[in-house]
Amino acid sequence: MASRVCPKCNTRVPAASLAAFSNGIDCPGCHTLLEVSPAARMLAAWAGLAAGYVAWRLTRGGPGALGASLPLLYALLAFGIVSALGTILVGDLRIASEPPPVAAPAAHGHGGGHH
């Protein structure tokens, strides 16, 4: 199946919403709740980790205080960019399973302050 296509109605899902909301996307055609498949999510995460390692490896060892912190910044940026692009490129969509119901906090009948 093609990437970024609703499995129910074959409507193309925008790339921006796929990268931003990979855990719960509303299909623009049929309004079904969709999510990125776990295999595509793991592939994008591993690609991001590899890119972060390469960025850290290429920029480490600089002089001064920035020499220790800039490689970490570059690795974090590389991870974020590559994992988002990987999700967009290989993000196979599937119909999301229903989330478990959220219970409301129990009220005890008296205020929160102590006397």
Image: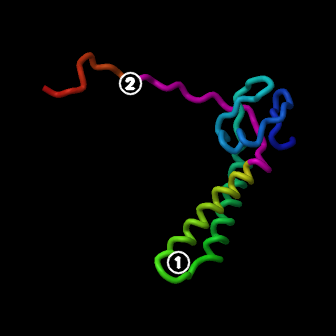
Q: Residue at x 82, y 43 (%)?
A: 3
According to the image, label 2 marks what residue? 105
Range of residues picked out in magenta: 88-105
Left or right of 70: which side holds 9?
right
| Residue 30: quarter of image | top right
* Of the two numbered discs 1 and 2 in the rendering, the one whose residue sits closer to the viewer: 1
Left or right of 91: which side holds 97?
left
| Residue 106: quarter of image | top left
Q: CA distance from mark 1 to mark 2?
A: 48 Å
**Residue 82 spot, x, y in % from top left:** 70, 58
**Secondary structure mainly formed by the magenta segment:** loop
**Residue 24 spot, x, y in % from top left:** 65, 34
Q: Residue at x 53, y 25 (%)?
A: 101
Q: For the residue marked with disc 2, what is the amino acid? A: Pro
Left or right of 9: which side holds 41?
left
Q: Is residue 19 above or below residue 71?
A: above
According to the image, label 1 marks what residue? 67
Colour scheme in the image?
Answer: rainbow
Q: How dense is the environment of label 1, judged by Cα within 10 Å: few (below 14), some, or many (20 and up)?
A: few
Give SS at disc 2.
loop
Q: Is residue 50 above or below residue 1?
A: below
**Residue 93 spot, x, y in % from top left:** 76, 39
Q: Residue at x 63, y 69 (%)?
A: 53
Dividing the image into 4 quarters, which one contains the N terminus?
Answer: top right
Dividing the image into 4 quarters, which one contains the C terminus?
Answer: top left
Q: Is residue 99 magenta?
A: yes
In front here: 81 or 40? Answer: 81
**Lower sequence index among marks 1 and 2:** 1
Q: Is residue 70 above or below residue 96?
A: below
**Residue 49 spot, x, y in % from top left:** 64, 62
Give SS at disc 1.
helix
Q: For the residue marked with disc 1, what is the amino acid? A: Gly
